[in-house]
Structure formats: C-alpha cells, structure tokens
Image (tube, rainbow, N blue to C red):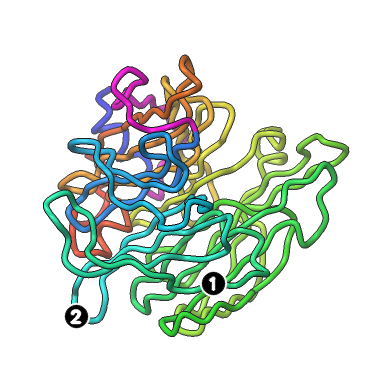
Amino acid sequence: MKVTIVLALLCAGAHAATELTATPFIGATESKFGPTIEGAAVDKAGNIYAVDFDNNIATAGSVTGPQKQLFKAPDAEALINGIRFAVDKSGAEEAYVVDAKLHQVYRLSGQRGADGAFANSGVFCKDSTMLQPNDIAIALSTGRIFLSGMNYTADSVIGNGDLWTCGADGVAKRLGQFYRTNGIEVSPDEKTLYLSEAENKKGAVTMNRVLAFDLDAATGETKNKRVFVDFGELDKSAATDIDGMRTDVSGNLYVTRNGIGKVSVFDPSGKLTATISTPSIDSITNLEFGGPAGTDLYMVGKCKDTPAKGCVDVLKGQAVGNALKRLGGGGGTTKCGQ
C-alpha cells in the first residue's frame, strides 16, 4: 500500500495501528548537522530547521533546501535546543529559540535575508531558576510560549522537571514542577497542552508518559492534569524516553521515542493509531511537518551508522502539520479515507 494512502489512516477513527516507514532525507555523508541535532521547526513557507548546525550547539540551520545557517547565538556559552516560528500582530514572521544553558529564549524578528536569517535578535524572556529550557511550544493565537526542562539524575524527584510560560510581555512564569520533562506541544484548538514526563530509579528509566492539561492560551494557566498515555502500560516501553512531540491539524499527537527509532501517533482520545520507523535514526530527538502542503513529516536525530553526525528521515503523505497551517501555509485538513 502506498505511503500517501496509508498515512490517511492516522486520522481519528482508523481501526488499527498502522506500521509506517520513513525514508532517508539527509544522510551522514551530506549532513552539516552534528549529533545533537534537535528542535525541528517549520516556517510559514514550509522550510524545516534544526539546531546543532555546523556541529555547533549554539547554531541553528536549514534542513530543507540548501543547508545553511539560520541563527547563531551571540554568547559562546549558549546551548540552543528548540525553535518555533510565529507571526506577530502585523503578520510579520518571527521565531523563538530556546537556550538551555543560559535559561533564556531568543526572539528573531525583522526582515529575512536571502539566506533566511532574520535581521534582528534579542532575549525575549529569561529566568535563572528555569532548569533549562529544553523544548518549546507556542499558542499562535496569543503568541504565548510554553517551555519544558529537566535535570537528569539517577533517582528522579519532583522538581527535576519544570513547565514555564512567557507571555507577549516577555515575563516568565513557572506553571509547575514534575519528574523530568521534555516534549511539549499545544493542540490545534489551543485548549490542551501536552507534556512528557519521565522518572529514573537507581539509574534506570522506569516511567515515560505524556500528560495532558486543560489550557487557557491567553493567560497560560493549566489545570486538570491527567495521563494521556503511559508507555509502560501501553507497550511496556517505559524505559524508552520521549523526546519532541508535534500535532497535525486533526489533533493527532506524534511522539518521538528516543532510542528505538520510532514515532508513536495517537488520536485526540489517546488511542495509538500508527507507528513510524526511521531507518537512519535510532535516537530521534524531534520532528515537524513541512513542505509546500505541510504533509512531509521530517524526523531528526543522531545518525545510526555515523553517530558523530545528525541525520534526517522523512515520511511524505496526507496528514497536514498543525504548525504550518497555523502560520498561514500548507494545505487544508488532514484527508481521511483516500
């Protein structure tokens, strides 16, 4: 069965979990990314970007099209780990880049040059008590960003993970503390926030789950914390960490499994509808939909056969990415039954 047909089964209402396989997009030989490639993001033209460009943890670059630099943090101590694009009230494109070492978020704005780089950059929000941040999500209707971070220890305690938000005023506010947290995403209707949580005991990973919260996108407040999926209960894979997460326009949640080369796909009710295998990558760190129609799912991580390089695999199909659609690009809704 063709991938473009199979991917339609990711829609809510599909009867059984489907096994899909991505294809290599950037291999070790041609890659300009280092082994900590992360933070996949899409701009409103459908271009995909990631961090650790030129094997530099302070630099982000383009994955699709010519591989070239998008942004380099001005501080040599920076460790940038996540990116999200947005549009401001005037409709101008901007981007937010998280710095896990200096506990801050950069805002990129202004005219974009021929190389895609923004004219301006500066610190948007910062708080020295953030654990990192490690990953970022955004409610595009309000411009509010959400941040996760972690402190990896042999025996996890509440407080090894945190959740923060920054409003348009750039003020950072902590929303909660957890076991170590990583992947984070906002649903298409901006009424649900997803956050991964993991626990270690005596050096072994013993829990990996996705939490869901009711979200007020205007204030950033979260409530009604609940377990969306627990991988220990689902398939006994609690020892495999969750990393980046993304949604499509139908609200399906795509969850990377860092270490086994798979992405798990869940419908909005929490039912597993598909798994996607990445032939070039075991340690998948993040993913995002891009391309002209927003239907190409790019997955990034350390190359399986050349661990010193970053690789990218892609699955092309019919599911439309939420981020690109909300930016004003891409196709319509995810197509089902075709």
Assign a secondary structure to mark 2.
Answer: loop
Q: Amino acid at mark 1?
A: Lys
x%, y% of residue 169? 44, 85
The reply to whether residue 217 is visible in this rendering is yes
Q: Is residue 129 left or right of residue 186?
A: right
Assign a secondary structure to mark 1.
Answer: strand
Which mark, by number, is residue 126? 1
Residue occupying the point 36% across, 51% down: 72
Q: Is residue 301 left or right of residue 86?
A: right
Q: Earlier in the sequence, mark 2 or mark 1?
A: 2
x%, y% of residue 155? 85, 45
Farthest-out residue, top: 305
Q: Pick the residue in front: 141 or 41.
A: 41
Which mark, by number, is residue 90? 2
| Mark 2 vs mark 1, CA separation in Å | 25 Å
Query: On screen, 187 above or below 277?
Result: below
Residue occupying the point 22% across, 47% down: 47
Q: Pick the residue in front: 278 or 95.
A: 95
Farthest-out residue, left: 114
Is-magenta flag for residue 12? Answer: yes
Q: Pick the residue in front: 335 or 22.
A: 22
Report which quarter residue 323 is drawn in. Answer: bottom left
Q: Pick the residue in front: 260 or 47.
A: 47
Q: Amino acid at mark 2?
A: Ser
The residues colored magenta run: 11-35
The reply to whether residue 331 is visible in this rendering is no
| Residue count near mark 2 (Cα–Cα under 10 Å), binned few <14, some 14–19, many ≥20 | few
